[in-house]
Amino acid sequence: MAELRSRLQSWEGLLLVILVIVMGLNALAAPGYLTAQNQINLFQLSVEKAIVVLIMTFVIVSGEIDLSVASVMGLAAVVVAWSTSQGVPTEAAIVIALAVGGLCGLVNGFWIAIVGLPSLAVTLAGLIGYRGLARVLIEDRSIGGFPDWFESLGQRPFIGPLPLALVVFAVMAVGATVLLRSSGFGRYVYVLGNNIQAARFSGVRIARLRLAIFTLSGLIAAIAGVLLAARLGAVRGSTAEGFELDIITIVLLGGVSIFGGRGTMSGVILSILLILNLRNGLGLANVTGNTQTGVIGVLLILSVLVPNLVGAARSRFAREEPVVLTSPGMTQVD
Amino acid sequence: MRLLLRHVRPEQLRELTLVLIIIAVAAFFATQIDDFVSARTFTRISTSVAVIAVVAVGQTLVVLTRNIDLSVGSIVGLVAYFAGTMLSNDPTIPAPVIISISIVIGASLGAVNGLLVAYGRVPAIVTTLGTLALYRVALVELSGARTVTTDALPAWMLDLPRVTLLSLGAVDVRPLVVLAVAIAVVFQLGLRYLPFGRRLFAIGSNPDAARVAGFPVQRDIFATFVMSGALAGLAGFMFLARFGNITVTAGQGLELQVVAAVVVGGVNIFGGVGSIIGALLGATLIDLLQQSLIRWLEVSEFLRDAILGLLILLAVASDKVIIGRLRTLWIRERRRSQDSAELSGGVARRG
């Protein structure tokens, strides 16, 4: 009983309660909302973001940030479409797109891990630069004309009622949870985010770890981008533009600290479900997509502001020194 | 080299290098593009830099304190639309009133950022990523997808970007350009000589030390966000004057241009180092490169963003590798000259 109470008082417990409330309200507003098929359909609309959220959790827990993921998604989608339109078989085009995504991540990782530049600046350059490369390839056209099998991968059920992207997400979610919680790699990611000096002195190969995280981030963003292209059936220069806002919001709302070192995968997965259901609920209430984005923006700020205020109030109540977070703004490399 | 280091600080070397690079780039394109060295090129680049430069001044203040303001593009768009709508509804509103309104709206939006960052302790990247979306959403909702068009604006507004304030030979200087340069100079002087300006460097170099030293860190950070917002508001007015037609996407992506200008201009993204003149030079170099490359290679304008990304990366990398090394050399050189002064019986000066 006591354990259950402390569970519910945690951030994850709070998310669960809000999730149940939001789903309940949605079910009242729209009969048939809770059917499995409807939930699958709703999830499918944002599953690509959800996939990137998983790797972004690793990035942020390690004390860094990757602003370039949405541009890498867009670039991968554009590369698949452009290569196909140039006569490359789509199977090969997918491999090229994933390689390009991994390379983008590797380039980010090189500057951050080897040269030692701040990830904020490097991935901001990536956000602009990779989107620029996509625009150079596609200009202001919209490229479609994929083979049927590719589009049906994105749009038709793959296993049972589940489309491929959902299967990929499910497998990756399990893998990411195990990796972050129970593997040496995951422990290193926490140590790196918590205390870089401690990580260095305990023999963590920091540069290699960072390089791996950012390369994975690029690769997984590319997978998500290819899946997005398959679902949409046509790609533009602006595909996936602005997705980084949703992705980072979901991670932070899941209880991951922007300063690194804290957060759990279960919290992040609850946060994915919450945001998707919230967007759908707002849609049911005839709130436009634009206002939904505004709500996400408010949530992003609140997800950091509320714990801060609660922490400050609690420490004042306990007559302790207030918790002072050093250097608000960004994580310092080195 | 040693002599050079004795008299020039590494940061000043950075600005000097930027000037040389700008001259070299201009000289290169002058040999490649017909009619490059002309009054028209100057006018085109200077007016397009002016808007970016005003926002970059505010961004410099914010970045100096180890923060970042990504919401400026949305503020520029929101203010440009709001001021445009007011003028369309009532063209008799005098210029000073509409400029003041623009600045006040921008400052209040900046104050929201500042409150959250300084007093709510929400990291600047999170806050301004959120308000970047929020302010844009507000614009879309307020406008109902209508646009401001040039023909609804009063005549003085339309003339503003075209009239010539003074002519130096064949070169015309536009009022917007003069305004931008004046703001840059005023803020550069303030940053250098006012206690507030000096505190920004201290906060950015070591926030904890600044707090322990009793500086009003929260108030100062709040003030930088208000100023950044106010300058973005002014830039919104300039944006309206320059383009006339304002849609809901006005100013979208401007924050990236501005952050690029600041970083290329040698303002350290970790705070504590940089100058407004540097940011101004950075903005100029980026615009010069982008506009000239497009004319030279006759490539599509879509290459712009790819160039911008590469420039940011090169600037940050060179900052880390070259300037960092120079600074170590400079400190060593200073110590050595002090030591020799002490040895030769001179008055020992420290600090």
Image (spheres, coloured by chain):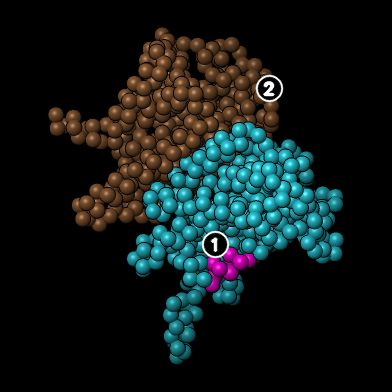
Chain colours: A brown, B cyan
Secondary structure found at label 1: loop
- The quadrant the C terminus of chain B occupies is bottom left
Q: Mark 1: which amino acid?
A: Gly
Disc 2 target residue: A86
User: Residue extending furthest left?
Assistant: A1
Q: Identify the magenta region.
A: B185-193
Residue A199 in sight in this render:
no
Spot occupied by residue A125 in the image (x, y as percentages of width and height): 56, 44
Chain identifier of the residue bearing label 2 in the image: A
Residue under the image location 54 percent in, 12 percent down:
A152
**Position of A22 compared to A139: left or right?**
left
> How far across and down, in percent of the image, does residue A142 sit?
66, 24
Pick the residue in front: B235 or A334: B235
Q: Residue at x 39, y 13 (%)?
A: A31
Please tell me how crowded label 1 is: few (under 14), some (14-19), or many (20+) other residues with Cα within 10 Å. many
Would you say the magenta stretch is mainly helix, strand or loop? Answer: helix
Magenta stretch holds residue B188: yes
Identify residue for label 1: B274
